[in-house]
Image (spheres, helix red, strand yellow):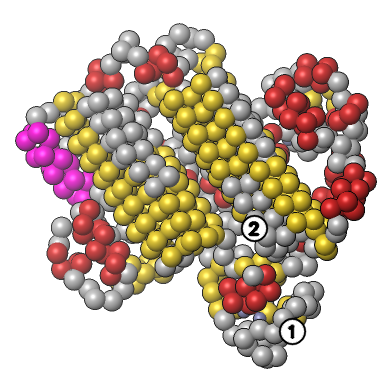
Amino acid sequence: MNKETYSTSSGQAKICQNCNQDFTIEPEDFNFYEKIQVPAPTFCPECRLKRRFAWRNEHTLFKVKDNSSGKEIFAGFPPSSNLKIYDRDYWWSDAWDPMNYGRDYDFSRNFFEQFRDLIYEVPWSSKSVTNVKDSDYCDQAGYLKNCYLCFNGDYVEDSAYCVRCTKVKNSFDLTQSLEDELCYEGVAINGCYRTFFSQDCEGCNDVWFSKNLSGCSNCFGCSDLRSKSYYIFNKPYSKGSYKQKMEELGLDSWASLEKIKEEVSKHLLRFPVKYFHGIRAVNSSGDYLRNTKNARESFSLDDAQDVKYVQFAYLGTKDSYDYSVWGNSASQMYESLTCGEQCDSVKFCFDCWPSCRNLEYSICCHSSSDCFGCVGLKKKQYCIFNRQYSKEEYGLLREKIIQRMDQMPYKDKKGNIYKYGEFFPPEFSPFAYNESMLNDSYPLTKEEAIKAGYSWRDPELKEYEITLSVSAIPDSIKETSDDILKETIQCLVCKRAYRIIPNELSFLRSIGLAVPRLCVNCRLARRLSSINQPLYYRRRCQCFGQKSENGVYQNSVKHFHEAGGCPNEFETSYPPSGKEIVYCEQCYNSEVA
Ligand SMILES: [Zn+2]
Ligand SMILES: [Zn+2]
Ligand SMILES: [Zn+2]
Ligand SMILES: [Zn+2]
């Protein structure tokens, strides 16, 4: 590595080889690259993130053939991906040896193509789960108990349809939420109990259809409240009249629920939002940050320090760049995805955990260290292309391969050059655009995805025979009998099949809520669409004196900036095209705190 590359005292302007946009590498970035001994990136942060996201399916199980038994099983990979899949339990057994796929490095071919061969020859585990009990239909998760269709979660119990959740109990249909109990249809709700159809709430009890509440209880259709009780549409009520009003709403009826949702969403848009979601985010930038220190341009983190360009990492992440999904005491992670749990110094890897160290360009390796270009290894050290070497041989061969990667780079379909220092190209991924988490954060149409150079796979529609149309479900939960558990219902939106499970029905009955008419995927898509994308815009505060810029919100107190309007600017993930009234911290706190 050329030392002089790192001796710049100010940022270095670069042009992304993928999108041709300018990006800047800051001196602090060079310090990190030097410390972990990687060259400076050639893709901009957004293109790097998208390249990683193309490698992960977050919430879909596919029916595939188990290559060990020939039986049909559920896996996190589409059947047409051409991956070899072993059922998880068999994969983790000693019945097969991934080292049997070992091979010498061929210096006449480029690294990435050789690695691609290995990816599609070594079997992958049907699911990426650890320590799960009675949770067969879950994936990308750890420490689950009695869960159903939960994905990307840790420490979740007696719950279903939760995605990106940690420490959640007895809850259904939550997304990007932490430490909740008895909650339903929530997005970014944290430390909440009995909170329903709500978003961006912190430490709330018995809260319904609300947004941006903190420490509130018994509130309905409210925005921007702190430590309040018995409020409906932001107006105070007595305990008695609150209870009476709630009963009149008729939440047991699907028709009323739909009407309420519409009314509430109009009401909530009349209130300002803070430009940033998060609490205890010290010297941090990005969005959805909790308990972070020096987290830059990062998205959805809890407990992270000294990280940049990191997304969806929880339970402790330190000193990492360009790292997506997991955390759990991970440090010095770089350009890696779905790796975590006591991992350290993991670069250009996918699905490697736990306690991996000094891994590079590896996939589905576990409890291994000092490996390069390996797939499916368990408890190995000093391996290259699934072949065992001595420590000395490993060091020498690794150096030679890295040199060769620079001399003989891979050129992808778009003409991007892949030397040492790039993550795997999206075109090697087993997932089409619409199967990957790319489509969750950056939804595209089929045409748009194909135009952008991605593949697309239409989902199979007629997988299950429909036995019930939504119009035949009784409007009220009170009239819904156990028979619904036997039915295969057709989703109102996508027309695909879904079911109601016993836990879900008893939960809905205990709260008094109508059964959903949308399938799991459509419900999730609706929640995901209410989360901002990991993109940032430079914007000005929309407080224009006594009112918001659009004249909809009337300030309740005098702000620091007098009548002329707030001069504050910020980076926010709320796009200028959005409907929300976006306030700076000072103006927001004047109104809300
Ligand atoms: Zn780019
Ligand atoms: Zn649907
Ligand atoms: Zn302001
Ligand atoms: Zn203001």
Q: Quadrant of residue 379?
A: top left
Q: Quadrant of the N terminus?
A: bottom left
The three-letter code of the residue at mark 2 reads Ser
* Residue 418 shows up from this direction: no
Residue at (47, 29) in percent of width and height: 143
Q: Is residue 300 visible?
A: yes
Query: Taking 100 as reference, is 415 above or below it?
Result: below
Give the residue at mark 1: 546
Where does the image place residue 255, in percent across and percent down from the top left?
90, 41
Magenta stretch, residue numbers: 391-416
Residue at 57% x, 30% y is 157
Residue positioned 29% across, 50% down in the render? 332
From the top left corner, tell me how far across and down residue 385 is, in percent.
23, 30
Q: Residue furthest left?
A: 392
Closest to the observer, 557 or 587: 557
Left or right of 580 in this view: 399: left
Helix or strand or loop: what does disc 2 sit on? Answer: loop
- Please state the horizontal and vertical placement of residue 500, each as a whole percent of the image: 74, 25
Question: How many dots with numbers?
Answer: 2
Q: Earlier in the sequence, mark 2 or mark 1?
A: 2
Q: Using the rendered view, name the quadrant where residue 149 is placed.
A: top right
Query: What mark, if any, has residue 214 been given in the picture?
Result: 2
Q: Is residue 202 left or right of residue 486?
A: left
| Label 1 neighbour load within 10 Å: few <14, some 14-19, many 20+ | some
Q: In front here: 152 or 127?
A: 152
